[in-house]
């Protein structure tokens, strides 16, 4: 919600910052990737009747490019996806749980759902390019949170959902990019989706 507010602030001051408010994308790694996708998929948080002119601005994006993204933060979904009972310590802190046993406490379940980008995906959402620097290798049984929290399997989980919805989702693996992070592809994706003309 803080980042949604920042996006609204930029739109409100678009003229000042020389921004086209109709062509805004987001990028980030890990938590920043999750936030970018949450904004890309979440229903518009704008409040058209608000007395606050910033709150009246849209929170929607035109594209997202993400790095090591978590398509879901629901520890139940993650455990099922990786066949593990482990939870990344950051998720325990994030949701305000005391320990991993709180995963079964129903009071946390709405938070798990609300925080997960994939939960909000609908057919009118922004296209996504997701790069995973972790090798696409099977994990050991009962993998730890640090082993699976950036795994490409989270990207394939996302792509399956977005393909079903007809939303463009490009997954790039470490194995696809021997030169490292494909920055040129990031830029091209943004240029294409934001309608930016280049000389190249």
Image (cartoon, rainbow, N blue to C red):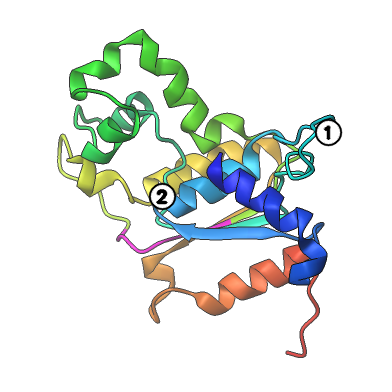
Q: Pinpoint residue 138: horizontal percent, then vertical percent.
A: 25, 48
Task: Check the image and report above or below for 38 versus 33.
Answer: above
Camera-side residue: 81 or 100? Answer: 100
Instruction: Give me the residue at 70% from left, 48% from top.
Output: 8
Q: Which mark is residue 31?
A: 2
Q: Pinpoint residue 140: horizontal percent, then vertical percent.
A: 15, 43
**Is the Cβ of the residue at disc 2 closer than 8 Å to that at disc 1?**
no
Q: Pinpoint residue 51: horizontal percent, then vertical percent.
A: 80, 33
Q: Quadrant of the C terminus?
A: bottom right
Task: Check the image and report above or below for 88 versus 107.
Answer: below
Task: Check the image and report above or below for 155 versus 91.
Answer: below
Q: Which mark is residue 48?
A: 1
Residue ranking furthest to the bottom: 199
Instruction: Give me the residue at 27% from left, 34% from top.
Output: 93
Tell me where the magenta segment starts and ends, as one range.
129-135
In reply to whether residue 148 is colored magenta, the answer given is no
In reply to whether residue 130 is colored magenta, the answer given is yes
Dot 1: what SS?
Answer: loop
């Amino acid at each position: 919600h803080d980042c949604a507010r920042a996006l609204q602030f930029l739109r409100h001051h678009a003229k000042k910052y020389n921004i086209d408010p109709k062509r805004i994308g987001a990028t980030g790694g890990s938590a920043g990737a999750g936030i970018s996708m949450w904004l890309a998929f979440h229903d518009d948080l704008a409040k058209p009747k608000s007395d606050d002119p910033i709150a009246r601005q849209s929170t929607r994006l035109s594209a997202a490019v993400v790095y090591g993204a978590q398509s879901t933060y629901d520890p139940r979904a993650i455990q099922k996806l990786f066949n593990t009972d482990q939870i990344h310590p950051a998720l325990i802190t994030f949701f305000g749980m005391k320990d991993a046993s709180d995963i079964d406490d129903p009071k946390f379940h709405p938070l798990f759902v609300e925080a997960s980008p994939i939960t909000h995906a609908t057919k009118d959402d922004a296209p996504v390019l997701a790069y995973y620097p972790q090798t696409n290798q099977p994990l050991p049984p009962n993998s730890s949170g640090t082993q699976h929290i950036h795994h490409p399997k989270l990207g394939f989980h996302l792509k399956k959902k977005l393909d079903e919805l007809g939303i463009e989702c490009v997954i790039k693996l470490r194995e696809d990019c021997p030169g490292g992070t494909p920055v040129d592809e990031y830029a091209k994706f943004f240029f294409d989706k934001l309608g930016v003309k280049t000389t190249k």
